[in-house]
Image (tube, rainbow, N blue to C red):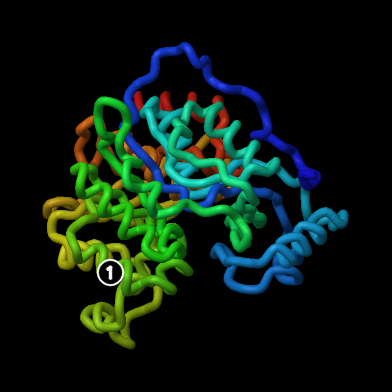
């Protein structure tokens, strides 16, 4: 049975099947469908119950995930109620594009036939995301505990061990969307955990002249798959690269650091240089690629064809509630502008607006009221 929590995505709200549909313009690769259990916690709870760096994403087995949720539900005064929602990096981006910007987006991947799979599918349908390429298989859906601290920083513990996964064979025709092909394929860094999946996805995109957007997802992902990521970028098959500061730093090699860093450079100055070193590296590895580095509450920097765009952070109506999905929603905004042929500066700004919107809600699903705020900022 579902774990106790507010099942905010477990609805039967499905768009009218007879409503006219726009052609799917973006497909997002969701290797494993994931349901997030989001909970706000205090500093003491994090210190006593969570190993590893705050703000990261770590794989755990089912026993560890259940034990962590049991501690949350034990009535600890530093924790609040659990909100259960559809999650996953690619799904967050797809939902943002479809619901927030009206860009018809689909998911390719796999979902379990359990109760959590139903939560995931209903949430995607409610957001008008095309799930025609999302295969339901016998088995479990992935689950993640998202712990949000007092500063709004999220730390993720994910169990995907027994979850059903997408097969490489599914990707053969995943970009065929009726009479036309889609224009973009979004690949999250998490896809590198599935051996050969990224290569198969990139091959499918190349055969159909579809642009590839790669979002690095987490610094742990980069630490584990740095060589494979660099090799893919150097191949020239990635059109747009998305990273935050931690992911950008993890991607840069010791040799890159040695060119600019020295022991006399202050730590704060070194951190400030990281995004530009990242832009330099991507331009060196793949001169035709667009590189984007998000800077949290300081905005972002981006570079394409030798042009650099700097975008300041967007002021929000309330303080940060949760950073879960902020990077995923940034990708939604950036791509929504890119699809419309906007300049690099405008793409960066819309990305910052969408990323800021994600911080106004607990969990990665943006409320209708916050989407209204996004529309006002875009006018």
Q: Which residue is mark 1?
A: 230
Q: In front here: 44 or 256?
A: 256
Say which element carries label 1. helix
**x and y percentages locating residue 192 in the rendered image:** 41, 63
Vertical order, 175 against 377 (above or below): below
Using the rendered image of the protein, determine whether residue 184 is visible from the camera's viewpoint: yes
Vertical order, 53 against 87 (above or below): below
Using the rendered image of the protein, determine whether residue 155 is visible from the camera's viewpoint: no
Q: Residue furthest right?
A: 75
**x and y percentages locating residue 220 in the rendered image:** 48, 69
Q: In front here: 291 or 162?
A: 162
Vertical order, 152 against 361 (above or below): below
**x and y percentages locating residue 58 in the rendered image:** 57, 66
Which image quarter holds the C terminus? top left
Vertical order, 86 against 300 (above or below): above
Number of residue marks: 1
Question: For the point 55% across and 27% down, which residue is it?
Answer: 126
| Location of residue 332 (image quadrant) | top left
Q: In front here: 300 or 210?
A: 210
Question: For the point 25% across and 83% down, which residue is it?
Answer: 255
Q: Residues within 10 Å of mark 1 (few under 14, many from 20)?
A: some
Which image quarter holds the N terminus? top right
Q: Residue furthest bottom?
A: 263
**x and y percentages locating residue 279 in the rendered image:** 24, 62
38 to the left or right of 295 = right
| Location of residue 59 (image quadrant) | bottom right
Question: For the point 23% across and 43% down, which residue is it?
Answer: 210
| Location of residue 225 (image quadrant) | bottom left
Question: For the point 81% across and 59% down, which residue is it?
Answer: 70
158 to the left or right of 353 = right
């Amino acid at each position: 049975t579902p774990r106790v929590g507010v099942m905010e995505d477990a609805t039967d709200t499905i768009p009218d099947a007879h409503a006219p549909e726009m052609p799917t313009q973006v497909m997002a690769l969701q290797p494993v469908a994931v349901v997030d259990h989001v909970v706000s916690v205090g500093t003491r709870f994090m210190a006593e119950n969570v190993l590893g760096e705050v703000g990261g994403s770590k794989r755990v087995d089912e026993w560890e995930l259940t034990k962590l949720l049991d501690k949350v539900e034990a009535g600890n005064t530093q924790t609040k109620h659990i909100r259960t929602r559809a999650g996953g990096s690619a799904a967050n981006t797809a939902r943002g594009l479809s619901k927030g910007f009206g860009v018809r987006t689909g998911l390719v991947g796999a979902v379990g036939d359990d109760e959590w799979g139903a939560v995931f599918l209903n949430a995607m349908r409610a957001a008008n995301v095309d799930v025609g390429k999302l295969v339901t298989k016998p088995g479990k859906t992935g689950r993640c505990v998202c712990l949000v601290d007092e500063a709004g920083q999220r730390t993720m513990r994910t169990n995907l061990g027994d979850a059903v996964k997408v097969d490489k064979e599914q990707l053969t025709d995943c970009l065929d969307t009726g009479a036309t092909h889609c224009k973009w394929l979004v690949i999250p860094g998490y896809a590198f955990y599935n051996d050969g999946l990224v290569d198969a996805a990139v091959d499918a995109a190349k055969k159909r002249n579809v642009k590839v957007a790669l979002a690095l997802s987490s610094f742990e992902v980069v630490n584990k798959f740095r060589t494979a990521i660099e090799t893919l970028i150097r191949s020239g098959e990635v059109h747009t690269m998305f990273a935050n500061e931690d992911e950008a730093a993890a991607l840069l090699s010791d040799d890159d650091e040695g060119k600019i860093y020295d022991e006399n450079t202050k730590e704060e100055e070194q951190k400030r240089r990281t995004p530009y070193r990242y832009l330099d590296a991507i331009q060196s590895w793949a001169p035709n690629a667009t590189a984007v580095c998000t800077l949290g509450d300081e905005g972002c920097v981006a570079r394409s064809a030798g042009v650099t765009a700097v975008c300041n952070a967007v002021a929000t109506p309330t303080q940060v509630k949760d950073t879960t999905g902020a990077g995923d929603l940034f990708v939604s905004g950036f791509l929504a502008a890119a699809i419309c042929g906007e300049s690099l500066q405008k793409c960066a700004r819309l990305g910052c607006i969408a990323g800021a919107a994600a911080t106004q809600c607990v969990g990665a699903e943006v409320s209708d009221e916050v989407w209204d705020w996004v529309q006002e900022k875009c006018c």
